[in-house]
Image: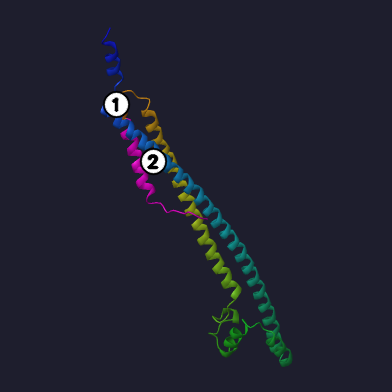
């Protein structure tokens, strides 16, 4: 009966391997929890960046449509005034022709001058109208093209931000898996099996950590 306390003490004693495994499990729980929180934070941030990029893309598309509409309206004005000028010129009504010519828009006059200099009535190689001349340009049309390019770039940025957010979400899942193995290891009594489970958790954690290290980071939106 006197040896019973010693036997109980020996039964309750933990091996050095058990203590080390417990330490590894605690470390994994701590670092995986921090990594999970960080990945969740970055996923939310990139979702915000995505929303801003999509907003910028939509705004640029709206402005592009507006500029394109304006360019079409100005082109119609040019066509109408040019048609009236040609009719007056054909009727040899110089006064009326000069009236319309003076009212050509500033963007249109260089094209008309360049076209007239080619003597289109005698030169078969001349473009049929001033609208085919390289001098005919519409600032609103160029603005529409620039805004369209801007919208496409913003849309591409939004899609890239969305992919980054999704990558961080996947990282959260993988870090959570590492947390699971670290947590379940505390329920295993065998130090050897516990060590195998912890090692598997570390493999998942370290592999995911190396992958996340390649991700871009944003701390403000």
Q: Position of residue 203 (x, y in %)?
A: 32, 38
Q: Which mark is residue 31?
A: 2
Most extreme residue toward the top is 1
Residue 127 lies, with reference to residue 12, above or below; the image says: below
Residue segment shown in magenta? 197-221
Is 217 displayed left or right of 89 in the figure?
left
The answer to whether residue 90 shows anywhere in this view is no
In terms of secondary structure, where does tag 1 sit? helix
Q: Nearer the viewer, residue 135 or 6?
A: 6
In which image quadrant can residue 75 be found? bottom right
Residue pictured at 31% horizontal, 34% vertical? 199
**Residue at the disc numbered 1:** 191
Residue pictured at 42% horizontal, 39% vertical? 33
Which quarter of the rendering shows the N terminus?
top left
In magenta segment, residue 133: no
Q: Position of residue 54 (x, y in %)?
A: 56, 56
């Amino acid at each position: 009966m006197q040896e019973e306390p010693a036997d109980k003490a020996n039964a309750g004693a933990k091996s050095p391997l058990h203590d080390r495994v417990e330490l590894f499990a605690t470390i994994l729980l701590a670092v995986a929890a921090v990594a999970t929180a960080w990945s969740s934070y970055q996923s939310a941030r990139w979702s915000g960046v995505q929303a801003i990029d999509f907003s910028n893309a939509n705004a640029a598309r709206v402005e592009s449509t507006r500029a394109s509409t304006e360019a079409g309206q100005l082109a119609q004005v040019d066509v109408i005034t040019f048609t009236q000028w040609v009719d007056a010129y054909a009727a040899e009504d110089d006064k009326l022709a000069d009236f319309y010519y003076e009212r050509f828009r500033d963007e249109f006059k260089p094209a008309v001058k360049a076209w007239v200099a080619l003597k289109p009535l005698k030169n078969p190689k001349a473009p049929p109208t001033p609208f085919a001349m390289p001098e005919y340009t519409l600032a609103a049309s160029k603005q529409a093209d620039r805004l369209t390019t801007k919208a496409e770039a913003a849309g591409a940025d939004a899609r890239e931000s969305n992919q980054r957010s999704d990558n961080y979400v996947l990282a959260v899942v993988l870090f959570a898996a590492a947390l699971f193995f670290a947590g379940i290891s505390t329920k295993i009594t065998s130090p050897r099996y516990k060590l195998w489970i912890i090692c598997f958790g570390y493999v998942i954690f370290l592999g995911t950590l190396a992958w996340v290290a390649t991700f871009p980071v944003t701390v403000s939106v």
